[in-house]
Amino acid sequence: MRLIRTACCIALTLPLFAHSAPAHVHGVAKMDLAVDGNKLTLSMEMPLDNLVGFEHLPKTDKQKAALAEAMASLKNAADLFVPTVAAGCKVDTVDVGDPFPGGKAKADGHADVDADYVFRCAQPAALKGLETKLFKRFGRLHRVDVQRATAAGQGAATLTPEQPGMNW
């Protein structure tokens, strides 16, 4: 996962985003969230199993289709994340990493997906929270551990299917 480093928050993010949880836990994703001026940045890491139910190179047409669909869904940030509506945030950039760079599986048999999202907000002062629809889209995902750095301070939250949103 890439650390979020913004001009105002770099001193805050270095200790905040040092995750202590194991790097690869099925059913769990990690998200770093930072707000810097009018920019909301989300950086996520999760096991591929959370998305498609396997972590090997897709072998069948069904697995290939499942992977393609999952990757397409991850690229549609507006369908996955809902920042505070009053903030008027729009998707600026999306970068979803290939779980099999170069068409090869990792030697340890684990495949992860990294995704970075940047939203630009017309009314950043109104940005007070975020809701995710990840759980509705990916049924194998049970928890998202979020660490945040905003003008309101640092904090952490655990998102679940029952509690898919957070405020700050």
Image (cartoon, rainbow, N blue to C red):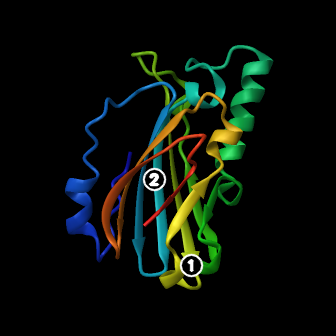
| Mark identifier at residue 43 | 2
What residue is shown at x 30% (from left), y 34% (from top)? 21
Say which label, 1 or 2, has the lower sequence index. 2
Q: Amino acid at mark 2?
A: Ser
Location of residue 30 in the rendering, given as x and y in whole percent from the top left corner = 43, 42
Location of residue 153 in the rendering, given as x and y in whole percent from the top left corner = 30, 69
Residue under label 1, please give it: 121
Q: For residue 85, what is the image quadrant?
A: bottom right
> In the rendered image, which quarter contains the C terminus?
bottom left
- Number of other residues with Cα within 10 Å of mark 1, as a class: few under 14, some 14 to 19, many 20 or more: many
What residue is shown at x 56% (from left), y 47% (from top)? 163
Foreground of the two, 57 or 23: 23
Q: Is residue 58 above or below residue 97?
A: above
> In the rendered image, which quarter contains the N terminus?
top left
Q: Amino acid at mark 1?
A: Cys
72 with respect to 24 (left or right)? right
